Image: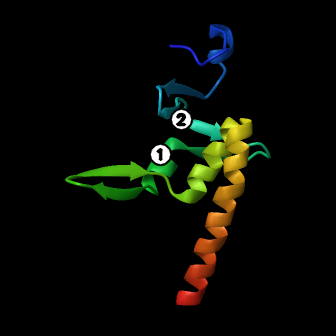
Amino acid sequence: MYHRGARPSSLERRPFFSLLSDDLKLDFFRCRTYSVPGGESFTFAEMYSRRKVVPVEDFAVYVPRLEDLLRTKRVRGSPKDLEDVKYLEVLLEREAEGGARGQ
């Protein structure tokens, strides 16, 4: 399966791929270490160790923390992901304000 509009040779250099259906898009990152513009790097193992567990009915879903989701959006760097970065930053600010009030 190829990312829409991508040639196989360009896919080999990308750290991600997407699966698309009519109403769902899933992004998969396929490398173990990721580099964010600006020089920061992180690993999948680091992100996995910080995951949140969300119970859904009788099973658990593992999701990244907002900070890690923000990092992956910066790695991907598509216009949609960069738009998401703005919203994630607002969520992080609100989360920090809520935590500061609760202390």
Horizontal side of residue 23 vs 79, given as left or right: left
Horizontal side of residue 84 vs 28, given as left or right: right
Q: In x, y percent, where is residue 37? A: 77, 42
Q: State whether residue 34 is above or below residue 14.
A: below
Q: In x, y percent, where is residue 58? A: 19, 53
* Residue type (three-letter) at the residue carrying disc 2: Arg
Q: Residues within 10 Å of mark 2 (few under 14, many from 20)?
A: few
The residue under the point 69% across, 51% down is 85
Q: Which disc number belongs to residue 20?
A: none
* Residue type (three-letter) at the residue carrying disc 1: Ala
Q: State whether residue 36 is above or below residue 88.
A: above
- Mark 1 and mark 2 residues within 8 Å of each other at the beta carbon: yes
Q: Which disc number belongs to residue 32?
A: 2
| Disc 2 element | loop
The residue under the point 69% across, 14% down is 10
Tag 2 or tag 1, which sits nearer the N-term?
Answer: 2
- Foreground of the two, 12 or 79: 79
| Disc 1 element | helix
Residue 78 position by quadrant: top right
- Disc 1: which residue: 45
Horizontal side of residue 16 vs 74, given as left or right: left
- Foreground of the two, 10 or 48: 10
Q: State whether residue 43 is above or below residue 21.
A: below
The residue under the point 61% across, 44% down is 72
